[in-house]
Image: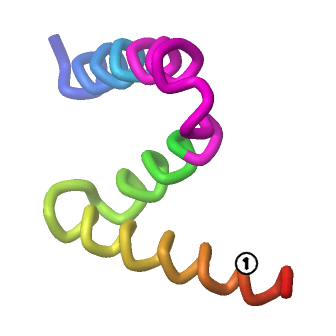
Amino acid sequence: MSTNTALAISVGVLGAVATWLFLGPLGGALAIWAAFIAWGCFFHCGGKEHGLQSAILCNAAGAVIAGITLI
Protein backbone atom coordinates (compact mmCIF):
# COMPACT_ATOMS: atom_id res chain seq x y z
CA MET A 1 0.00 0.00 0.00
CA SER A 2 1.39 3.39 -0.95
CA THR A 3 1.77 6.22 1.52
CA ASN A 4 -0.92 8.28 -0.21
CA THR A 5 -3.40 5.40 -0.01
CA ALA A 6 -2.66 4.87 3.68
CA LEU A 7 -3.06 8.60 4.36
CA ALA A 8 -6.34 8.73 2.43
CA ILE A 9 -7.75 5.76 4.35
CA SER A 10 -6.69 7.14 7.73
CA VAL A 11 -8.12 10.60 6.95
CA GLY A 12 -11.39 9.01 5.85
CA VAL A 13 -11.67 6.89 8.98
CA LEU A 14 -10.75 9.78 11.29
CA GLY A 15 -13.20 12.03 9.45
CA ALA A 16 -15.99 9.50 9.98
CA VAL A 17 -15.15 9.17 13.68
CA ALA A 18 -14.99 12.96 14.10
CA THR A 19 -18.34 13.38 12.33
CA TRP A 20 -19.95 10.76 14.56
CA LEU A 21 -18.53 12.41 17.70
CA PHE A 22 -19.45 15.96 16.75
CA LEU A 23 -22.96 15.09 15.58
CA GLY A 24 -23.58 12.60 18.38
CA PRO A 25 -22.20 12.80 21.93
CA LEU A 26 -20.51 16.21 21.51
CA GLY A 27 -23.18 17.66 19.24
CA GLY A 28 -24.11 20.66 21.34
CA ALA A 29 -20.61 21.67 22.41
CA LEU A 30 -18.45 21.73 19.29
CA ALA A 31 -18.79 22.62 15.60
CA ILE A 32 -17.73 20.01 13.04
CA TRP A 33 -16.82 22.63 10.42
CA ALA A 34 -14.35 24.30 12.78
CA ALA A 35 -12.71 20.96 13.52
CA PHE A 36 -12.26 20.15 9.82
CA ILE A 37 -10.79 23.61 9.15
CA ALA A 38 -8.35 23.21 12.06
CA TRP A 39 -7.48 19.72 10.86
CA GLY A 40 -6.79 21.06 7.37
CA CYS A 41 -4.59 23.80 8.85
CA PHE A 42 -2.63 21.16 10.75
CA PHE A 43 -1.90 19.20 7.57
CA HIS A 44 -1.20 22.38 5.59
CA CYS A 45 1.42 23.42 8.17
CA GLY A 46 3.25 20.14 7.66
CA GLY A 47 1.75 18.00 10.40
CA LYS A 48 3.79 16.63 13.27
CA GLU A 49 4.66 18.82 16.27
CA HIS A 50 5.67 21.93 14.34
CA GLY A 51 2.46 21.81 12.31
CA LEU A 52 0.42 21.41 15.49
CA GLN A 53 2.09 24.43 17.11
CA SER A 54 1.62 26.57 14.01
CA ALA A 55 -2.00 25.52 13.54
CA ILE A 56 -2.90 26.19 17.19
CA LEU A 57 -1.23 29.62 17.18
CA CYS A 58 -2.74 30.68 13.86
CA ASN A 59 -6.23 29.38 14.69
CA ALA A 60 -6.16 31.08 18.10
CA ALA A 61 -5.01 34.35 16.51
CA GLY A 62 -7.79 34.05 13.93
CA ALA A 63 -10.38 33.49 16.65
CA VAL A 64 -9.16 36.54 18.60
CA ILE A 65 -9.17 38.73 15.49
CA ALA A 66 -12.67 37.51 14.57
CA GLY A 67 -13.87 38.28 18.09
CA ILE A 68 -12.40 41.78 17.97
CA THR A 69 -14.02 42.33 14.57
CA LEU A 70 -17.43 41.43 15.99
CA ILE A 71 -17.11 44.04 18.74
Amino acid type of the residue that numbered disc 1 sits on in the rendered structure: Ala
Q: Which quarter of the rendered picture does the C terminus lie within?
A: bottom right
How many numbered badges does the structure rendering display?
1
Q: Position of residue 56 (x, y in %)?
A: 37, 69
Q: Position of residue 12 (x, y in %)?
A: 41, 16
Nearer to us in this view, 60 or 47: 60
In the rendered image, residue 27 lying in the magenta stretch gets the answer yes
Task: Please give the name of the residue rendered at 37% of the width and 56% of the height, measured from the top-left corner.
Answer: 42
Task: Please give the name of the residue rendered at 48% of the width and 75% of the height, measured from the top-left corner.
Answer: 60
56 relative to 44, above or below: below
In the rendered image, residue 64 lying in the magenta stretch gets the answer no
Mark 1, Cα crowd under 10 Å, few <14 / some 14-19 / many 20+, is: few
Nearer to us in this view, 8 or 38: 38
Task: Please give the name of the residue rendered at 26% of the width and 72% of the height, measured from the top-left corner.
Answer: 53
Nearer to us in this view, 21 or 39: 21
51 relative to 58, above or below: above
Secondary structure of residue under mark 1:
helix
Q: How is the image coloured?
A: rainbow
The stretch in magenta equals: 16-34
Q: Which quarter of the rendered picture does the N terminus lie within?
A: top left
Q: Position of residue 37 (x, y in %)?
A: 56, 49
Seen in the image, is 20 located left or right of residue 69? left
Residue where numbered disc 1 is placed:
66
1 relative to 65, above or below: above
Q: Position of residue 67 (x, y in %)?
A: 72, 79
Q: Quadrant of residue 2?
A: top left
44 relative to 21, above or below: below
Seen in the image, is 52 located left or right of residue 16? left
